[in-house]
Amino acid sequence: MLERVVEDWLTNVNELGYEESFAHALLAEGHQVIHRQQHGELELGKDIFTRDSNGAYHCFQLKGGDIKQKKWEKIEGQINLTVTSPIIHPNVPLGTNFTPHLVTNGIISDPVRVDIFARNLIWEKQYGRQLNLILYDQLLEKFLALQSSFLPAKPRDFQLFLTLYLADKSEPLNCAQFSTFLLSVLPDATMLQAEIKRLFAAVIIIADYVISGYEAIGNNYAAAQAWCLLTFHLLRFCEQHRETKDWHDSIALLVESIDRCTAMVVTEAIKSVNWMEGNPIVDEKVWHYRLSSLVGLMSAHMISHRMRLAKLPDEDEAYARIARGAAGLKLWGEYAAPAIFLAAQCLCARGAERAGIEVAMGAIRTITEKNRRGNAVGIPDPYFDCEEVIRSEVLREDVYGDKVTFAGRSFALRQLVEFLVRRNWPNTLRKNWFHIADIDYVEFSPELEPDSYLWSNGRGSTNGRRWAHPQRWCDLIEESLAEINDPLLIDGQFAFLLPHFFLFMPHRFTPKRARHLDIRVLLSQTGR
């Protein structure tokens, strides 16, 4: 059954659709991926170039579908570059010989095959290399061989995979289902180091069958979220396999995919006039929900790159839209709290600290007003996403139930308050402290810290506290600068993924990690 699914997928995707899977298959075979070409940039006929386990270099030019004479005439110039142009990369000595490959998820017609044979004779004589072909059958065999030991073991898990594969890709990603499926193919027990690369490649390729559908129709927000969830689940596995050489290259490629999809959303958002879709009268009712998603993702993208000391080439344009959108942000639920937090960070990082503080204070005021003790419902906690809140607020459906109330507590209040404390705004907080101190700040603590990566986790406890009234400022400062005692990988070498972690998993937006991220952002502004 899976073979038919893979055949269907491989037949219908273009070269961008299978590039991610192909790159991870190369990693499993012992290649080191040196570079992946960003499409649309300078094209030298080399989408991927690698170094294999023997130290030999390879270049791969990916194409989609059958290559017959007419198509060959269009691409033969590019293929000539694949063979004849040198590898230009700082980590590859100029003039290094390599093996060129033409890869396609189709077939090559006989006239084209004969032409390549004739050209290979010339290329061999002039450059000492020939063009190798990797066609549909070889790709299919490569992908299926990797997955043979890591398939969904139970019928219900395979049914879940089919549900995700066949889902309407214009709709948001079902994160709970996607997380459950990933857990079904990732082992809980430790593995031999020799098997880890193969495991990662298999899981990523299986996930790519689902994710590539979102990318194919331009639903890049859902694709970015899916790549992030996949990365977080794999990082959870890495927590018990800390030898980075076994998985670092795989995670690095996933980060590239996250950046690529996020950058596409940012580009679309910059070009859009008002971020509205369809009928403005109808769309107005959901515009605030879209606003928080777009401002949040643009902010996460900007902050993540700043933490890597790699300023975005279009940061000025992105920041202009963030600043414009931040003024209209509404805390419609605590699911949107990370987006507001990230937007406030961006404003402060660009020197507009007063505006950033006002964005954070706006969310604090909303929480203290809506979640005041005695209120009927209050602001939904981060376990209710925008779709559920829309059903409640716009469609008037009974989503929360008669006995549910969020009054008197908040999962996001402490993060927002400490944001102001770290920037030394005591007077602003003092004016609102009576209402702030009336709300319990609550946090879910998992029984096992690595389970923080999971979308759903029933093992843990929810604890709440309330600030004193009056509250000593020095105590607030000390708490707001406290370090994480049990850091995970995402708190260390992958801390630049924390903005995405919060945005796409708002119920994991905890005080200690918000604090950790904010301190890292503040330090990055000083170049430390």
Image (cartoon, grey):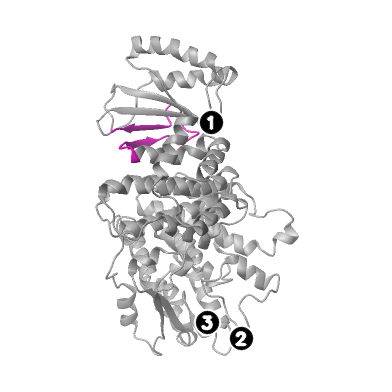
Range drawn in magenta: 28-52
Which three-letter amino acid code belongs to the residue tagged 2?
Answer: Ala
Residue 434: x percent and y percent? 47, 88
Q: Is residue 117 above or below residue 238?
A: above
Residue drawn at the location 55% of the way across and 77% of the way down: 366
What residue is shown with label 3? 368
Q: Earlier in the sequence, mark 1 or mark 2?
A: 1
Q: Earlier in the sequence, mark 3 or mark 2?
A: 3
Q: Nearer the viewer, mark 3 or mark 2?
A: 2
Seen from the viewer's position, the closer of residues 321 and 156 is 156
What residue is shown with label 2? 376
Q: Residues within 10 Å of mark 3 (few under 14, many from 20)?
A: many
Q: Which mark is residue 317?
A: none
Real-space CA distance between mark 1 and mark 2, rounded to the nearest whole angstrom: 57 Å
Name the magenta segment's main secondary structure. loop
Q: Is residue 389 above or below residue 290?
A: below
